[in-house]
Image (tube, rainbow, N blue to C red):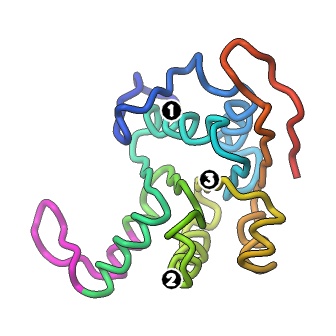
Amino acid sequence: MHELPPIRMYRKNLDRSFYRINRFLFRALKVACSGVVPWPLTLMSGKGVGKTCACLFYCDVTRGSLYATHRSFTSDLHLVRTGGLADPVTGKRITEEQFWKRVVDFRLVVIDDVLMGKAATPLAVDTLMQIIRYRTFKPLILITSLRPSEIRREFGDNVLAALCEGTPVVVSEQTYHPGKTVNKNEKT
């Protein structure tokens, strides 16, 4: 997926230089993006281990990628369903079918903050399940700061199973700090 020099498309002010990316996450992303493991790649851990920065780097080097938070994606889908989202070029309203076709057509989709805070509504859970279904066998990275046990407790076995359907990766909070080594990584 690395063809051209990186272009920052999303969250441009967030530092994600290659040298600051958690090496464990980089390896997991590299393996997933090479097509060796099944999609979706679900990154689970506490906050601050570099999941977002690593995925933003991959969006920067993958033309035709989409990065969105779960909350903003759900909000956009709600706007589509209520007739309030228009194509920025034509000005015409986007149908739900057009919306999902665009999601399917991206080379890589990254959804951040999955099931976090205000994104944890029944509509958001339904949207998450739709994203996973529409992106079956296509590059999809889901990022959450929840552990598998928290997902099971809050949302049930079906949601956890959907998140773990492809390649789930649980990263320890101790995994990365600049200048330190990678350790205590779990892959489930």
Q: Position of residue 142 (x, y in %)?
A: 61, 56
Residue 171 among those drawn in magenta: no
Whether residue 164 is situated above or below residue 112 in the rendered picture: below
Q: Amino acid at mark 3?
A: Ile
Q: Secondary structure at mark 2?
A: helix
Q: Position of residue 145 (x, y in %)?
A: 66, 53
Disc 3 crowd rating (10 Å Cα; few below 14, some 14-19, many 20+) is many
Q: Main secondary structure of the magenta part?
A: loop
Q: Position of residue 67 (x, y in %)?
A: 44, 50
Query: Which label number is shown at residue 180?
Result: none
Between 120 and 133, the one nearer to me in the picture: 120
Q: Amino acid at mark 1?
A: Phe
Query: Which label number is shown at residue 143?
Result: 3
Q: Which residue is the extreme one toward the top?
A: 179
Q: Are marks 2 and 3 in contact (CB under 8 Å)?
A: no
Whichever of callouts 1 and 2 sits on the residue coming sooner in the sequence is 1
Give the magenta range: 83-101
Give the CA separation, mark 1 to mark 3.
14 Å
Give the CA separation, mark 1 to mark 2.
29 Å
Residue of label 1: 57
Query: Which label number is shown at residue 123?
Result: 2
Whether residue 18 is situated above or below residue 102 in the rendered picture: above
Q: Amino acid at mark 2?
A: Leu
Q: Is 186 on the left or on the right of 121, as rendered? A: right
Specify the quadrant of the image occupied by residue 31: top right
Give the CA separation, mark 2 to mark 3.
18 Å
